Image: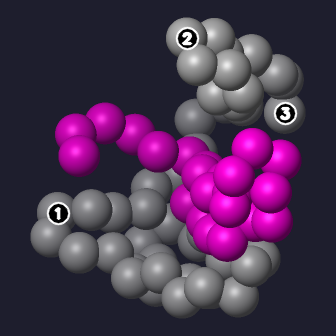
Amino acid sequence: MAGTVYAVEVRNGIDGTVVANPNFSGQKPGATSFTDTAGRPWTLNGSALITALAPGPWFRIDQSVIGGTDAIPF
């Protein structure tokens, strides 16, 4: 994947149980692995790297309806 990812929340269905919750922006710059709040270990591969976070604002995008998204400020 090309781009910048700050955080991801993967759920088991719409509004289901969180199955993965990595917050890359909450990690120390240069970290190569960490454990998310759902207890899942994450390891960076290839050219992936964690850098200092740029100032916000940041938004969460929820895909709650096919063809629709909601942007919610963090």
With respect to residue 5, does 42 lie above or below? below
Q: Does the magenta run of residues contain 73?
A: no
> How far apart, in angstroms, are the residues tagged by discs 2 and 1?
32 Å
The dominant secondary structure in magenta is: loop
* Front position among marks 2 and 3: 2
> How far apart, in angstroms, are the residues tagged by discs 2 and 3?
22 Å
Tag 1 or tag 2, which sits nearer the N-term? 1
Give the residue type at disc 2: Gly
Read off the residue under disc 3.
74
Query: Is the residue marked by circle 3 packed among few (<14), some (14-19), or many (20+) residues within 10 Å?
Result: few
Question: Can you give x and y, in whole percent of width and height, for residue 41 in the image?
Answer: 54, 88
Q: Which residues are magenta?
A: 1-25
Give the residue type at disc 1: Ser
Tag 3 or tag 2, which sits nearer the N-term? 2
Read off the residue under disc 2.
67
Tag 3 or tag 1, which sits nearer the N-term? 1
Is residue 64 left or right of 16 when viewed as pictured? left
Is residue 30 left or right of 28 when viewed as pictured? left
Task: Quadrant for residue 62, please give it.
Answer: top right
Read off the residue under disc 1.
47
Question: Can you give x and y, in whole percent of width and height, for residue 60 in the image?
Answer: 72, 31
Can you see residue 56? no
